[in-house]
Image (cartoon, coloured by chain):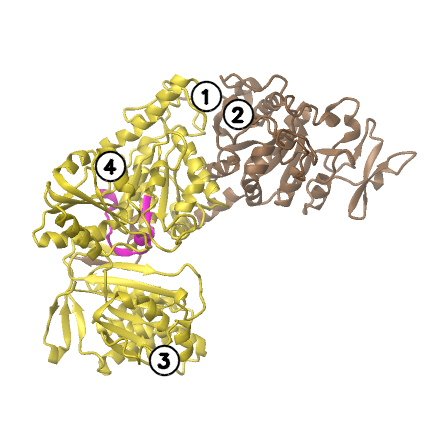
Chain colours: A yellow, B brown
Amino acid sequence: MSTTEEGNQSERRIQEIDSATVRFAGDSGDGMQLVGGQFTTASVFSGNDISTLPDYPAEIRAPAGVLAGVSGFQINFSSHKIHTPGDVIDALFAMNPAALKVNLADLKRGGLLIVNSESFSQDDLEKADYSDNPLEDGSLEDYRIVSIPITSMNRGAVEGLGLDRKAADRCKNFFVLGLAYWIYNRPLDNTLAWIDRKFTKNPALRDANRRTLEAGFHFGETAELFDSSYQVRKAPIAPGTYAKITGNEAVVYGLLAASHLSNKPLFYGSYPITPASDILHQLAGLKQFGVVTFQAEDEIAAVCSAIGAAFGGSLAATGTSGPGVSLKSEAIGLAVMTELPLVIVNVQRGGPSTGLPTKTEQADLFQALFGRHGECPLPVLAASTPADCFTMTIEAARIAMEFMTPVILLTDGYIANGSEPWKIPDLNSLPKINVEYYVDIERFQPYARNERLSRPWAIPGTPDLMHRIGGLEKQHITGAVSYDGENHEYMVKLRQAKIDGVEEDIPNAEIFGDPSGKLLVLSWGGVYGAAQTAVEFVRESGKSVSSVHLKYLNPFPKNLKKILPNFKKILIPELNLGQLRYIIRAHFLIDAIGLNKTQGKPFRVDEIVEAIDRALEAE
Amino acid sequence: MVVTPQNPAELTAKDYASDQTVRWCPGCGDYSILAQMKKALASLQVEREKNVFISGIGCSSRFPYYTNTYGMHGIHGRACAIAGGLKMIRPDLTVWVITGDGDGLSIGGNHFIHTIRRNIDINIVLFNNRIYGLTKGQCSPTSEFGKKTKSTPLGSIDFPIHPCTAAIGAEAAFVARSIDVHVKHLAATLEAAARHKGTSFVEVYQNCNIFNDGAYLYATDRQQKFDNILELEHGKPLRFGKNGEKGIRLRGLDVEIVNVGDDGVSESELLVHDEKAATPTLAYLLSRMHYPKFPEPIGIFRSVESPTYDELIHDQIAKAAAAQKPDLDAFFHSGETWTVK
């Protein structure tokens, strides 16, 4: 998607480009995620908009050099606003034959392919299931291949620092990073400073990484293996201070912010599960904010501890992935019945069962909406991008406490691990979450309701408000146990009405493009980036296509029912077999078209563009 | 609004009665446990609103509805997890878990072990009637081997779990046992459990007169109980029998019953109870004494101090806050940031 603009090449040999997508790939021990992270930081410091996609195997350390162990990190950086980590890659850094094999299909024709020539021994090739050496058999002639003896160049760079062979070889990712910095015209200073901080206690490693980073950079400059280096200009970005943030980090920040805005202590009970564990890891290190984190013995204990903490008056949250939600579902029903506030973050991954633990999918919508017994409604929200996880986490907490209900927030592996610039908000400008514990003894009834149909949050320790809650059906208002059928039906409807009423409290859906037309692309969750980019692209060619991105899945934004009939067709791209489409059909009696993918990967923009074109042609 | 909390010293058992009709089967042992709990609460002199009862599912788990405190009737087996979360966020509360042998040891066995090994400062009271009552008469994990029930018509082939042994195995710092009809002993045991800092575990032998009537007759019947029950007292030798004529002596790594007095051994040869013993060896040994081979100990097996989980969490929080100012705005800006003008 980059447009080439030749600079004064003969002198500066710098070519200005609009955007580029780069992928670093190697063994899962090669430090590719680290290199990708540093490259991302260097890009945002250079003023680019960025979007990243880490992709790593479920195996912790597959044997070196095999296909199963390939870890990759992709970054798209641009001089304009971007929404995705990029479809095809412009440059691939492949540390070994396996990394080449796994990633080559995504490299565009004519793209830059940088390989470590010394990792193409017979042994390496066999591990990667190559019968012939691709560097020699002509199979790579469509690419601009740059074959470099990275291993020995790195060893040369770190020589004399007293590192053993293994430690020395581990530095070679920084050689590659240095080379990447030269190719894309990035300064080294930030990464050098980072190395100094990281290795304060190990001067030898510090010096080695510094040296090899610089060696890689200088190699790019002197080796004349490249026609030019590239420069991506600054993107027009709204003024403000930014940080690079992943979706999981944004959930952490959102929980802290919600705790601050509501003035309620934060409790986070969780059980480790990919790709949600980082939320627990990070919160556990933020005890100074009074956060109580609890690594429970299982998913059930995790959610139950949060329910106990919610009863005790805290902003209680639990984070997990789909299989964990399965285990939590009975307890979520208890939270619905007891009407306690609770945030449940589901970082979706490929399912069912263990499925594809490190790969993304968007197939837990039905689970979020219906995965409990009985009539058990609760609000369901979905974040659209890594930074949006911040906003939607605060929303989930706000709705949970204002409506006294559990709320499910859906993110997914793609946005949880991906990163983008996040404009750091002014905390004082964020709206307060006004929730108070109930203390009025005169009128206290545990299941009396306010105008939102929300019951009072009266916490243990408050004099004279003693009450008992639990999973048995409640008598309306008094909360006493009731087996009365009429009352049960009334309460079932009341709980539903409370959740339905959340629509009065959430923003309307926004239309991108014209308010009516031939086609509406309706997306939700992490599909946002690809869908938005695709719609922007087709609109440039004058096609009558608009888009709506849903961040509230239950209830839907109030205006959605008015928007949908204004379009002849509705296309719903989802990383599942059509779950939102099913719901839209049921709710609005509209025959939406699905675009569905379940490969553990996010949509490519071209896939959605093609689907849009197909839908328009089929008129 | 002005609230004048009642002076806890003036509270009586009656103050702890809720407005709910108690719905256990007539003659159920739960009534007695409820009554003794109310007495224990009154004598603890804790503000009424500071007590919270959390339960799972089962007959015993209806208990929170019947105490005029805060309470939550949870889901099957998970009371310990709910109570733990509550205590972690609210160390100021006295938190009780009321559970049964099915709830606490079958479906909730996992949480039982982990709550105890963490030493969260809650009190677990397990009503053990060796049967499933609410689901109408299936065997429970404490049912004896060979027990014939609706689900085991040919006799249970599960070996029973012994609650006190399991608790000690999970490093419980406070373990006690009492009996529903042994009212004074029960009230005193519950009170001691509440006063203990850390997870306290109390097993209460409880009669289900519908599905397992008389399961503990050996321990409650006037004629038999002196021979079948041994009341533990800290620092006292282990004696039992109507006139204390029998005792327990250590033999190797096991125990044996001996006669005490003129036609037996002298009291100095008997095993002396030490609930404060640093290691749980003695408590474990005692927990392995089962009827009919041995008298079953009641009272406090073990009561030692160790740091509690909730205390440790809040220590960590306080230390972290002292080391690093909890400034959220500064934290948001603490990583690598860049400014666009």
Looking at the picture, which amino acid does disc 4 mark? Answer: Arg
The image shows residue A364 at horizontal and vertical percentages of 35, 44
Q: Which residue is mark 1?
A: A481
C-alpha span from label 4 to label 3: 56 Å
Callout 4 crowding tier (Cα within 10 Å): few <14, some 14–19, many ≥20 = some
Residue behind mark 2: B62
Query: Which circle's residue, 4 or 3, is located before the other in the chain?
Result: 3
> Do marks 4 and 2 share a chain?
no
Q: Which residues are magenta?
A: A410-429
Q: Relative to A64, say whether B116 is above or below.
A: above
Structural distance between the alpha carbons of marks 1 and 2: 10 Å
Give the mark, 1 or 3, whose residue is nearer the N terminus.
Answer: 3
Chain for numbered disc 3? A
The residue to which callout 4 is attached is: A585
Disc 4 to disc 2, how far (Cα)? 44 Å
- State left or right for residue B262 relative to residue A202: right
Q: Which mark is residue A36?
A: none
Tag 2: amino acid: Arg
